[in-house]
Image (cartoon, helix red, strand yellow):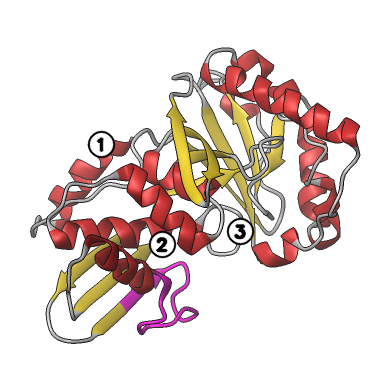
Amino acid sequence: MPATSANLGPGFDAFGLALGLYDELTVIPGGSGVSVEVSGAGAGEVALDESHLVVRAVRAGLDALGVSVPGFVLKCENRVPHGRGLGSSSAAIVGGIAAAYGLAGVELDREHVVALANELEGHPDNVAAAALGGFTTAWVDGGVGRAVRNDPVAELRATVYVPEVKVLTKQARGLLPDAVPHADAAANAGRAALLVTAITSRPGLLMTATEDRLHQEYREPVMPETLALVHKLRGSGWAAVVSGAGPTVLVLDALSGKEIPALPAAPDGWTRHDLAIDPAGVQVWSGEPSTASTRARFDDKTL
């Protein structure tokens, strides 16, 4: 399952982008309960029982498919950092539902994955990108999460600056006002429309298209260093935004590989990752391939 970045500036709760940083799950059916093993991000912090988010997503997926799998072993190899605005919970939910399809022996229905994942996550932006890959626009229609996928320009790249500190999505969303000025809403609508064009065909517009007046500045009290970095990067001509609810900073560009190093190094206490755009979304393989075989197929499909 790929990491994801939501909002992308003006596309609040609508836009998502799948990134080339991945969590992997292994689910082995058998027995009558669950056994959970976690390595990487979240190890030693998350529940290891039925309350684990992936387990709940697997159960929800199996229920939706009408399939009973009483017990299984779940192994999580997590690379997407938790609580940083890179869609770790969406990866867990989408991965769990996709694993349910694998356990059921049913071909993956990505539209259904988006709808069910939205029920568990509460908003469809990140789950859409995790399920579909690429650049997605998501919405809720009659309570059902839906999304469409677009292909970004081939040269689009993403750089993320990830701080050591976490910010809870609930905390960040709690700072948003109940009402915003009409002028700000109108400005964001225009920038969001422009961003679709910028990402899919005219990346030279990325700087203007990523301007936001609806949510980023309101979150500054809980992530002042994030907003300071966004302002610094934008002041240098980089299309920088808050990734999801933060505190990670996302920079979008479509420059050649030789020009990418012009981006500054990560500040002290932060980590920089230069990532490709994931084109495929969540992937499922059934059977018992060797680790080397799995990784080779994984790399071919997603990178």
Looking at the image, the residue that sits furthest to the front is 142
Secondary structure at badge 3 equals loop
Task: Give the residue type that dot 2 points to.
Answer: Ala
- The residue tagged 3 is 84
Residue at image coords 15%, 61%: 104
Residue 44 falls inside the magenta stretch: yes
Marks 2 and 3 sit apart, C-alpha to C-alpha, by 14 Å
Tell me residue 189's x, y (percent). Answer: 74, 28
Label 2 Cα neighbours within 10 Å, binned few <14 / some 14-19 / many ≥20: many
> Magenta stretch?
37-53
Secondary structure at badge 1 equals helix
Circle nearer the N terminus (2, 3): 3
Task: Give the residue type that dot 3 points to.
Answer: Arg
- The residue tagged 1 is 301
Tell me residue 91's x, y (percent). Answer: 42, 56
Residue 283 in sight in this render: yes
Relative side of 298 to 242, left or right: left
Relative side of 18 to 176, left or right: left
Please, what is the dominant secondary structure of the magenta stretch? loop
Q: In the drawing, what numbered circle is on residue 142?
A: none
Label 3 Cα neighbours within 10 Å, binned few <14 / some 14-19 / many ≥20: many
Task: Give the residue type that dot 1 points to.
Answer: Lys
Marks 2 and 1 sit apart, C-alpha to C-alpha, by 20 Å
Q: In the drawing, what numbered circle is on residue 92?
A: 2
